[in-house]
Structures are given as structure tokens and as C-alpha cells.
Amino acid sequence: MASETIISNPPPVNFTENALAELHKLRASLNVAENQYLRIGVKGGGCSGMSYLLAFDKKEEKDQEFAIEDIPVVMNRAHSMYVAGMVIDWEEGLSNRGFTFSNPNAKETCGCGQSFSS
């Protein structure tokens, strides 16, 4: 089965302006290949049971493809129920620097904000 392209309005997740700016910087500084996408998803592990996945990667067979602004994004179809409606932000402060995830589907989150349970 080939991967499918989904035109989603709105996309399953949203990025703040700060997060989009940081993604553009990362894509340029890491020389991310044109055939790579921003992968959003979840994986087992972390303090609360599941942790977020945000990385540049190639598209796989079970992926759905989205465009968020001009950033090509892929997500395993099965992950959408865990992240639908999530907002990803970039914070740069003295005590916290990195991507943050505000997930309306999370029942519990850990103190670092990088893992959750549903």
C-alpha cells in the first residue's frame, strides 16, 4: 500500500510561529535532504508511558502526508489519535529551551513535558 497524501484543514497538529521559525533554522543548519519530512508522532517510553517524536525522516508506507505552512510533514496514521489538536511551541529561556507539546488528549504528563499517558 502506498502512503497517502491528506489535505487536512486544519492539520492534525499546530505549530506556533516560534516553533515554525526554529524548524526552518534546524532544517537549514542540518542540511536536511529534500526527500525528508518532519515526522510527528509518539513512541513508547518516557516517564508517563509515551513520548513525543519530532524529527526529520523519510516517508514510510503507513504515513499520511501534510503540509504545515511550507513544511512537509508525515505522521503514521495510527498516531493521529494521540496527537490530534496538539500545539507545538518553541521556548527559549533560562530554565527551558526546546520544543514543548500542549496535548489535549493527554490525561497525564510528566514534569519535563516530553511524555504523557492517554
Image (cartoon, rainbow, N blue to C red):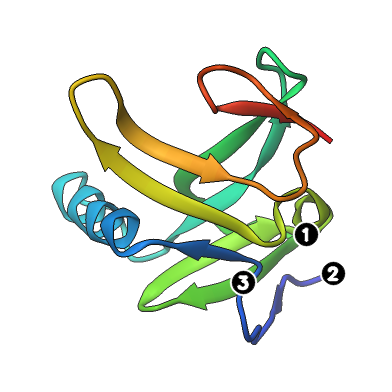
Identified by mark 3, the residue type is Glu
Viewer-nearest residue: 51 or 63: 51
| 109 lies left or right of 87 | right
The quarter of the picture where residue 91 lies is top left
Residue at the location (65% across, 47% down)?
Answer: 103
Q: Are marks 3 and 1 in contact (CB under 8 Å)?
A: no
Q: Residue furthest top?
A: 47
Pointer 3 residue: 65
Q: Measured along the vertical axis of the image, is residue 117 above or below residue 36? A: above
Alpha-carbon span between mark 3 and mark 1: 10 Å
Q: Position of residue 107 (x, y in %)?
A: 80, 34
Q: Position of residue 101 (x, y in %)?
A: 53, 42
Viewer-nearest residue: 71 or 2: 71
Residue at the location (57% across, 38% down)?
Answer: 53
Secondary structure at numbered mark 3: strand
Q: Which quarter of the figure is the C terminus placed in?
A: top right
- The local crowd at label 2, few if under 14, some if 14 to 19, many if 20 or more residues have their Cα within 10 Å, is few
Please identify, in this view, whether the residue under mark 3 or under mark 1 is nearer the observer. Answer: 3
Q: Are marks 2 and 1 in contact (CB under 8 Å)?
A: yes
Pointer 1 residue: 62
Pointer 2 residue: 1
